[in-house]
């Protein structure tokens, strides 16, 4: 991969090269086109290992997509593309399956739930640097619910309002994601529990003046009680929280400012 420096602004393909940009960078990236043919990749013995990797990667991307659903939309505050990070997380989970042969390894999140704790949706301003208080989440699997406890918040001290916007609010989510298992009969990856794969329940707090003092509070988030009957051990519950900042919108009411907030995964259980 190469990058172009200088005033040239070009995107697309020219000859044997592709030009494109990537979020978070103002540089133009250049890649050469070409490589083995699709038929060679599909049938040649020399690409057998690649085919196995591709098969497993499909499972990783499918899992990562549903995991993002489990965030309940809170990933909208992210200041970078979460998809590659979640794909990589899924791949690392897949590598832990030492009982299955390559090309058929499962994604067993339920065995490594704590590895996602503290996962940040931001890189420029981490959640703990913006909301400077201790936030504690307790997951109740029996009731398919979560409690998020926050101490007293003095926004002048405890909240970093980088853009000095006039409003802020707290948003929380309780999501669920299932392990992904390889199905030899269909040669695909499927969730162990389809009913609770990528679902969520969210809490959205009211918009509050940015200069404020909030008393100690507990946020309760719960799923429909019907899910209590179908929750299995191969399903992981994920609790996420975000701080959003807003301004007065066209209607005269507060509205969120894109990329002004931050969030993270509080815990999994």
Image (spheres, rainbow, N blue to C red):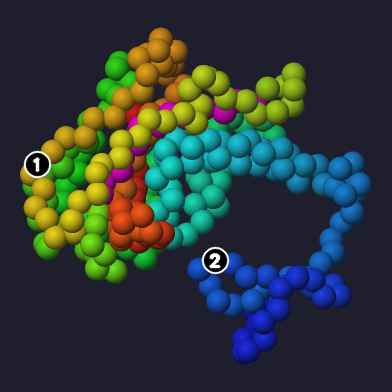
**Kind of element beneath mark 1:** loop
Residue at 85 percent of width and 72 percent of height: 16
Quadrant containing the C terminus is top left
Residue 122 locus on image (x, y percent) = 39, 58
Residue at 62 percent of width and 89 percent of height: 6
Viewed as shown, does residue 118 lie left or right of 105? left
Per the model, the C-alpha gap separating discs 1 and 2 is: 38 Å
Q: Quadrant of residue 95?
A: top right
Residue 229 locus on image (x, y percent) = 41, 10
Residue 152 locus on image (x, y percent) = 8, 47
**Kind of element beneath mark 2:** loop
* Mark 2 neighbour density, 10 Å: few (under 14) some (14–19) many (20 or more): few
- Please check the rendered image and state whether residue 249 is part of the magenta-colored stretch, yes or no: no
**Residue with the mark numbered 1:** 216
Which residue is more in the foreground, 255 or 3? Answer: 255
- Can residue 142 be seen in the rendering of this structure? yes
């Amino acid at each position: 991969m190469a990058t172009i420096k200088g005033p040239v602004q070009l995107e697309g393909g020219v000859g044997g090269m592709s030009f494109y940009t990537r979020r978070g960078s103002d540089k133009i990236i250049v890649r050469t086109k070409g490589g083995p043919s699709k038929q060679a990749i599909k049938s040649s013995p020399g690409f057998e290992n690649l085919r196995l990797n591709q098969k497993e990667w499909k499972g990783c991307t499918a899992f990562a997509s549903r995991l993002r659903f489990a965030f309940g939309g809170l990933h909208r505050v992210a200041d970078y593309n979460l998809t590659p990070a979640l794909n990589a997380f899924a791949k690392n989970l897949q590598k832990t399956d030492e009982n299955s042969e390559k090309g058929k390894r499962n994604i067993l999140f339920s065995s490594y739930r704590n590895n996602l704790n503290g996962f940040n949706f931001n890189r420029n301003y981490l959640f703990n640097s913006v909301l400077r208080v201790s936030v504690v989440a307790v997951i109740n699997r029996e009731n398919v619910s979560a409690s998020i406890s926050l101490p007293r918040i003095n926004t002048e001290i405890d909240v970093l309002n980088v853009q000095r916007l006039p409003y802020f609010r707290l948003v929380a989510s309780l999501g669920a994601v299932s392990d992904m298992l390889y199905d030899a009969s269909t040669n695909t990856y499927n969730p162990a529990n389809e009913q609770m794969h990528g679902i969520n329940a969210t809490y959205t707090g009211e918009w509050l003046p940015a200069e404020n003092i909030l008393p100690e509070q507990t946020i309760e988030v719960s799923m429909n009680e019907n899910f209590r009957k179908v929750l299995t051990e191969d399903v992981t519950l994920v609790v996420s929280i975000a701080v959003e900042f807003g301004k007065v919108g066209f209607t005269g009411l507060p509205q969120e400012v894109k990329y002004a907030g931050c969030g993270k995964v509080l815990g999994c259980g």
